Amino acid sequence: MLKDKFGRHIDYMRVSVTDRCNLRCIYCSQKDAFSWIPHGEILSYEELFEILDQAVKLGIRRIRLTGGEPLVRKGLISFIRQISKAWGLKDLSLTTNGTLLAEVAAELKESGLTRVNISLDTLRPERFKEITGFDYWHRVWAGIEAALATKLAPVKINVVVLRGINDDEILDLARLTLHYPLEVRFIEFMPVGKGAAWEKKYFYSTKEVIERLRPLGPLVPVVTQGGGPAHTFCISGALGKIGFISAMTHHFCATCNRIRLTADGRLRPCLFSDYEINIKSLLRRPHRTEEIRAYIKQAVDAKPRDRLQGRPQRLMRSIGG
C-alpha cells in the first residue's frame, strides 16, 4: 500500500484523459482566450495503461476518469473495458458534464464503469446556457436519467455554488434527493487556474448552504463508502443524499488519499500546488517500469501536509476535475 510521509494511505488516482470540453463554464474557462493542449502532448491510451498498471501494482485501488469532458475522447469506452478487466479495482468512476451520457450510459455500465459524477449547477435551462455557454440542459438531465436507469450508482450531482448566480436554487437542487436516489453535492467555488473567472464575490460557503437548507428539516449524517472528501447527510424520508465539499473553509488535507495524472502526463500530488512530475518523459525509454514506479512514489512523497497558499496556474479542465 502506498503511504505518504505523513502516514496517509494513498489509494486513489484521478486521471484526466483530455483537457477538451464541449462546454465553456464560467468558473473553469479563461475569460478571454481558449487554448488546448496539443494533441501530440496528450497521453495515448497505451501510455495511460502503462502508468496505471504500475500505480495499481503499488496500491492504487480507486480510479476516477476525468477531463475536460472525458466522453469527448474517442475510444474511451474500450479503454474503460480494458482497465476494468485488467485489475480488481475497488472503484472505477467517471466525472462528466452529462451532455453525452444518455447515449452511452448502458455501454459504460457494461464496460465495467462503477458510477458517475455529473456536473449540474442549475435546474433552469436558460441559466444553464448562461453558466456553460450552451443550451444543453435537457441533454444533461437525459444523462442523469440514463445513469439512474442503468444503475451507474450512486449517481452524484456536483453543484458549484455561485453567489448571485445559482444560490437561489440551493433548496430546489437539494429537493431532488426527496424524489430521486441521487447524491447532490454542494461544492465551494475554488480559485483554480490562471485567468479563470474566480472572484471572491461569487464565493458561497458550506455554512451558508446548510443555513439555506433549514426548511427541509434536520440533516442526518450518513456513513458512505467513498474515497472522496464529501461530508454526506440525508433528509428524513429522502431517496437520496446531500453532500458538502468544503475545499475552502474546511480543508480535508489530513484525510487526502489521492494523486492526479494530467492528460499530458504530469503527476500532481496536490490540486492546489503547481508542483508536477513529468512521468511522460519516461515512456519512450527502455527498461522504464521501475522508473515509472519510482516517479509515482515520488509524487506520493511530495504530497504536502496542508493546502498550500496561492492559486494554481493550470485551469481545472487541464488538471482534471
Image (tube, helix red, strand yellow):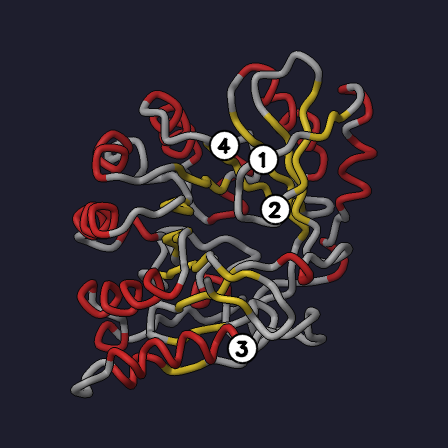
Within-10-Å neighbours for mark 3: few <14, some 14–19, many 20+ = some
Write down the residue under mark 4.
125
Q: Quick check: 9 above or below 216?
A: below
Q: Amino acid at mark 1?
A: Thr
Look at mark 3 in the image and give the residue it sits on: 301
* Residue at the top extreme of this rendering: 237
Give yes or no for contact between labels 2 and 4 (Cβ–Cβ under 8 Å).
no
Q: Secondary structure at mark 4?
A: helix
Task: Between residue 107 and residue 120, name the one nearer to us.
Answer: 107
Q: Pointer 1: residues within 10 angstroms few (<14), some, or many (20+)?
A: few
The type of residue carrying mark 2 is Val
Disc 3 on helix, strand or loop? helix
Mark 4 or mark 1, which is nearer the start of the sequence? 4
* Marked residue nearer the N-terminal end (3 or 1): 1
Q: CA distance from mark 3 to mark 2?
A: 31 Å
In three-dimensional space, the C-alpha distance between marks 2 and 1, rounded to whole angstroms, equals 21 Å
Point out the tag, 2 or 1, that comes first from the N-terminus: 2
Q: Specify the quadrant of the image occupied by residue 5.
A: bottom right
Judged by depth in the image, the label closer to the viewer, 2 or 4, is 2
Q: Secondary structure at mark 2?
A: strand
Q: Which residue is mark 1?
A: 224
